[in-house]
Image (cartoon, grey):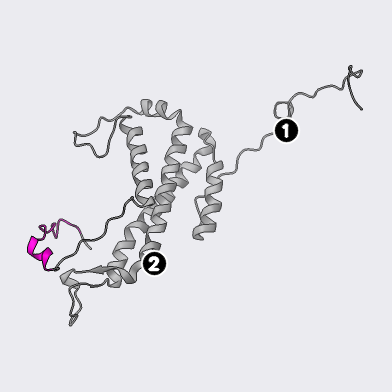
Amino acid sequence: MDDPRIRPRLPRPSYEMMRRGQISRMPRGTAPHPAVEITHASVLRAGRLLFGADWDPDSASGPPRTRPAPEIVADAGGVAELAQTVYRLTVADWRIAVAAPQAVTAIEHRLLTDAPEHHPVGHPYRFYQLHDHQLDRLRAPFQQVCAAQQAAAQSLLSTAPAIGMDTSRAVLDAAAHRHITARAWAPVPAAAPTARGVIERGPAMPAPATLGRGARL
């Protein structure tokens, strides 16, 4: 339940331990969790926007080449499209950060640990249920992410009218977040009213003076 550098990875169990049934392997899922897929896609999208289309987070090569800002803006399609891309990334991160503590709460009665420094006195087994402070340490980082992404989204939306960013997605996000999580999302600035006129409604077509051949009344 802590930094893995404090307790490094243990060596693989011996054949004798496996034969005597002293250890069992944890089952592995056949496919990654959707949250893992969303996180990987978000990292890949942000990384390739910043470092180029050939950037790979799993590559063992050296540090990526930093692209100049004009190149990033041009690749995104303009300032408004870049802001909208960054906004979508903040929304995805915020949703995961909101759902993660709820997932921890839902399964907290099944989470076990063998940290020796918190082992209950007189407990006969190696593994024991997590204490409240250990659960809080699992939830706290996600709660900090929620606040950071909320502030980032609010900053982007406040500049939307000036840069021409489309906020229709943000309006739907605000309604969805209130309905699903009962939390308020970043306020969406009101769009500037458009005067209804000839440009919006189109030119008026005059009525024909005479009925053409084949016209039906």
- Is residue 204 positioned above or below 163 on the image? above
Among numbered discs 2 and 1, the one appearing first in the sequence: 2
Of 170 and 105, nearer the camera is: 105
Camera-nearest residue between 165 and 6: 6
| Residue 3 location (% of width, % of height) | 19, 58
- Circle 1 packing at 10 Å, graded few (<14), some (14-19), many (20+), is few
Task: Report if residue 15 lies within the magenta region.
Answer: yes
Question: Residues in magenta?
Answer: 3-20
Q: Residue at x 36, y 33 (%)?
A: 49
Q: Position of residue 121 (x, y in %)?
A: 18, 81
Secondary structure, mark 1, is loop
Does residue 140 appear left or right of residue 114 in this picture? right
SS under mark 2: helix
Tell whether position 87 is magenta. Answer: no
- The residue indicated by pointer 2 is 106
Q: Nearer the viewer, residue 8 or 196?
A: 8
Q: Which residue is mark 1?
A: 196
